Amino acid sequence: MTAFSFAAGVALLSAEVTWSRTLLVLVGGSVDASASVLSSVMLGLALGSVVFGRMAGRAARPAVLLRVLAAASGAASLLPVVLAGPLSGLYPVLMAGPAPQWLVRALLSAALLIPPSALAGGLIPALAAVVAASGGGREISRLYAWNSAGASLGGLAAGLVLLEALGARLTLASSALLMAASSLFVRGRETVMPSGAAAGGPPGAVLCILYAAGGAIALAWEAVWARQLTFLLGNSTYAFALMGGAVLAGMSAGGFAGRRLACRAAPLGMFAAAESFLSISALLPLAAVLLLPGLPPALGLGGAAAAAAHHLLALLSIVPAAVCMGATFPLMVAAGARPESLGPDVGVLSMANALGAGLGPFLATRLVFPLAGVTDGAALLAALGGAVALAAAAVSGRRSAAAPAILLPASAVLLALSADPPGSAPPPGGLDLRFFMEDRTATVTVFGREWDGYRSLRINGVEEVPIDQPSLEAFNLLGHLPWAYNRDARDVLVVALGGGITAGAVLTHPVDTLVCAEICPAVVLALPIFEGENGRPELDPRFTLVEDDGRNFVAGSGRRWDIVICDATHPGSSDSWVLYTREFYEDLLEHLSDGGVAAQWLPLHQLPAEDLERILATWAAVFPHRAIHLAGGRHAVLVGSPEPLELDAARMFDTPEARRMLAMCAFTPADTSYLEPLATDWGGGGGGSARAGLNTDDRAPCQFMRRRIPADPQATIAPGAATLLAMSGGSDALRRSQMIYWSGDPAGAVEEIRGAPETPLSRRWLSLYLCTGAEQAMMAGMTEDAAVLAGRARSADGSWDRPARLLGALGRE
């Protein structure tokens, strides 16, 4: 039966990972949507545990039931992907109805996920009934541990390999086949049980409440770790797959350990001990985030070795707490399951734990994070875990279990309350903390530097809004260019608020409404820090902020827009790849008004050439008419429309507010040549041949680009810019100088730009190159050289304050 348990675990977690990815497209990636998906799976497992556990207890041949459940579970696992398409057509209708949006998403998640999850939930109780006469609780605990080990492998296989190689449908088909095939490993043995009724009763309410509370706290801890370890592991699909694999591997080890402990001590007392140790060991990921960044340099590690050390130690920090979680199953089985009624009793206990686990994501996102944030929320969870441990110790009657139940959680509370929140420590470069908030959706920080006015908005540690010349060009062009393509626009949708600069740019024009869909609404509180750049869009009566992910909002809005601007995060992030697929682009096109314009930010940093070509090809495959612009040498702006595009660049400057914002970037109405598109209506292959087709909801290679990104995040900028310039059939001195600059040669960029026509923008970039050289000299201690370069930078562009600030920092002003 070991082979069955392991194979079923592999198949189930592979399917669950695929379900989550499928539902991300249907109900969205917001915190509430993600919690609804996970809770639906847990509710299904709870339902199946109790229903099929009872059936297994009454079955004369539970092995037959187990085989049927495995085969049916494999077939039913296909339902979420099969039905997601038809239900997506109903989604706008449901969202337009009277029901709240969160309820619609919860019901859709439940309808798709509870049936297959319920069948899967019956596997462990039915397996318990099969082995009841040949090992009882010890045997089902051993098989549970092997099932968790298989689940770890299945989650890793799907998240790291299968979804990229096969796509969602084939990955789910392979997991369904494996689940069905696992039934072949079920060994049918007649169950010979003692005659007569089972002694005692099923697991009591107290045990069920304790186990449910433990499940809720465990899932809440996982939400905390996901938020904390993002600062070390990043926000990629790989990071979340590795975290899930580490948790399940730890639970497997805990299952084996708990099986041994259950035979050597009072199981309920050991359950109290497991919950006590969970409270303190659950803080190890927090310690890892705070301590690991300084460890590799101290050990002499750098580059790839330092990154590998970060990832390995961060993942290992999860394991001790996961071991405690996994140990609770065999301990609860030993405490509450009767040998002669093992299947039904395991079903009741599993139901209780799964019900609690279903509440865990909402406990974290609706109670703990809003009340206390993530770091102090860890203290709150430790206290709750201590309460569960103390209650279990009291019920067990073992006084020796009470001391750890008090001391360990209390220590955890004190440690968590004394810890600095992850992300609050300023990064290198003389930055200081200007804003910090651990919101229920993300951790938002703003760092700034006094001498040059630099600011950086970061979400979960990832820089999203740097205030520098290249980024300001991108934010402004993203907001102003669509208006220049559609001068009659009145209703505008902006996906992602960020620092509010793009939204502020749109509002400098005479539009009637601007709706901004933002998945992390806490960023609006940081907008005053960027007032000089954004003009405070949140104070404009035309502005409306909606807490939602952009794709979900577009699909459910039922509106057509004159302009839609997508300013989301990098396409390689775990939650933004859905904004770069063919299906989303088709949805955008469908929701544009006649003559409407869609625009999307496309970064060139950390974007391998094949992924750039694939995104260009995907855009070209959907939008009949399209254009592409380059901003700051490292950003692109894609434009698409159902109607022919005609740029009236002068209209970008049609109001004093618009001219002020554009002047900050050295854009002037006297010279609009840089604002013209590089290419229009290019073919499906973009700048070359898209080597692996398009990004689709089923298979989106951009979701997995992290493994293809070189160690230097800027290494892809110049090749990407070269690809775009090749689409235009040529280049100019300014853009060539930008490519040289992003290749790490500011001195070479200075020489190249001397061949460019003298315009405010070329003077700005010459000044930028000289400022960069001055800063490098300043950091090297060459003060005189730095002062000379800064003086030349001021002469190149006297309208820019950065050279003067640099001279002031050098004591020359």
Image (spheres, rainbow, N blue to C red):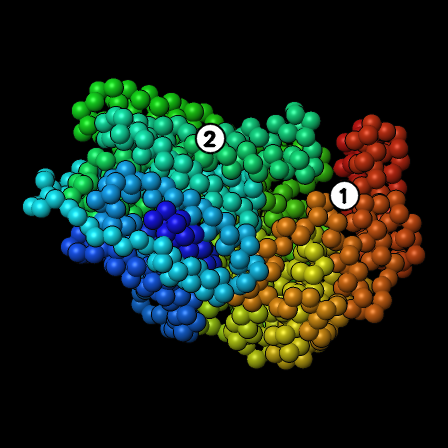
Rendered location of residue 703, percent (x, y): 58, 57
Whether residue 632 can be seen here: no
**Sequence order check, earlier mark of 1 and 2:** 2
For the question of whether residue 712 can be seen, the reply is yes
Relative depth, front residue between 407 and 421: 407
Residue drawn at x 51%, y 37% as measured from the top left: 315
Q: Which residue is mark 2?
A: 284
Q: What secondary structure is found at the residue carrying circle 1?
A: loop
Q: Secondary structure at mark 2?
A: helix
Q: Amino acid at mark 1?
A: Asp
Quadrant of residue 432 within the rendered picture: top right
Q: Quadrant of residue 182?
A: bottom left
Numbered badge on residue 398: none
Q: Position of residue 637 (x, y in %)?
A: 68, 63
Tell me the residue at 17%/40% (across/down).
338
Snapshot quadrant of residue 279? top left
Q: Amino acid at mark 2?
A: Leu
The residue at which mark 1 appears reads as 801
* Residue 408 locus on image (x, y percent): 35, 23
Eyeballing the image, is 85 above or below 33? below
